[in-house]
Amino acid sequence: MTNAEADNLIATLPKPGGLQIYREDDRIVMDGGKYGAHAISTGASSGERLLAHWRGYVETNGYSLGPGYTTAHPGVVTRERDYQPGDRIEFTDAGYTAAGGWRPGTVVRVTPKRVLVDFVYKYEREAAKKAGRPARSSQRWKQRNEVRRRS
């Protein structure tokens, strides 16, 4: 991709939450996130690669470009994700014998392949109740085929 192409594409991208994306010499820099800056080479990139990196940077920092952006072409509407942060779900857990091995939880974060689930172990819930404190939750990444909506 040429510098002019990169500049034109960067100008069209949404910049949620104060995140920044700009070209610096022959690098495209993504900055302003909680995990620091990320850069890719302009000459070794395509529009699709730039969009994929920007989308990943935005999502890693807890924001979204919205359902209308894909790595193929900006503005092409795709189906919205079936899980959103805060959704109540169930996930497979071999150590959980109740409900046939499906443990309840809440979606924290979603990627195209995985779902980060927040849940509380039963022993933790009981110990917290006895101690009069809130239960400590745990988190686990699960593949999308290991998660379903809570019925």
Image (cartoon, rainbow, N blue to C red):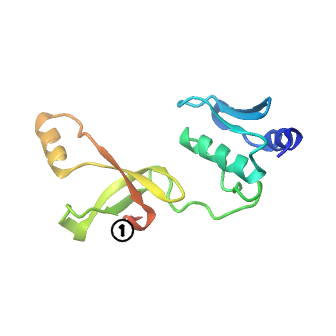
Give the labeled residue for mark 1.
Answer: 151
- Three-letter residue code for mark 1: Ser
Quarter of the image for the C terminus: give it: bottom left
Residue plotted at (77% across, 50% down)? 47
Front-lying residue, 149 or 9 = 9
Count every numbered label the image shows and give the total. 1
In the image, taking residue 145 as reference, residue 81 lies left or right, namely right
| Residue 101 location (% of width, % of height) | 24, 67
Q: Quadrant of residue 94?
A: bottom left
**Would residue 127 appear left or right of 27 to someone viewing this image?**
left
Q: Is residue 140 left or right of residue 86?
A: left
Observer-nearest of 87 and 26: 26
Say few, some or many: other residues with alpha carbon within 10 Å of mark 1 (under 14 / 14 to 19 / 20 or more). few
Q: Is residue 6 above or below residue 98?
A: above
Residue shown at 52% from the left, 54% from the top: 111
The outermost residue toward the right is: 4
Q: Residue at x 34, y 54 (%)?
A: 105
Q: What is the quadrant of residue 134 in the picture?
A: top left
State the image coordinates of residue 63 (x, y, percent, origin top left).
59, 42
Task: Tell me what residue is drawn at x 45 percent, y 63 percent.
Answer: 144
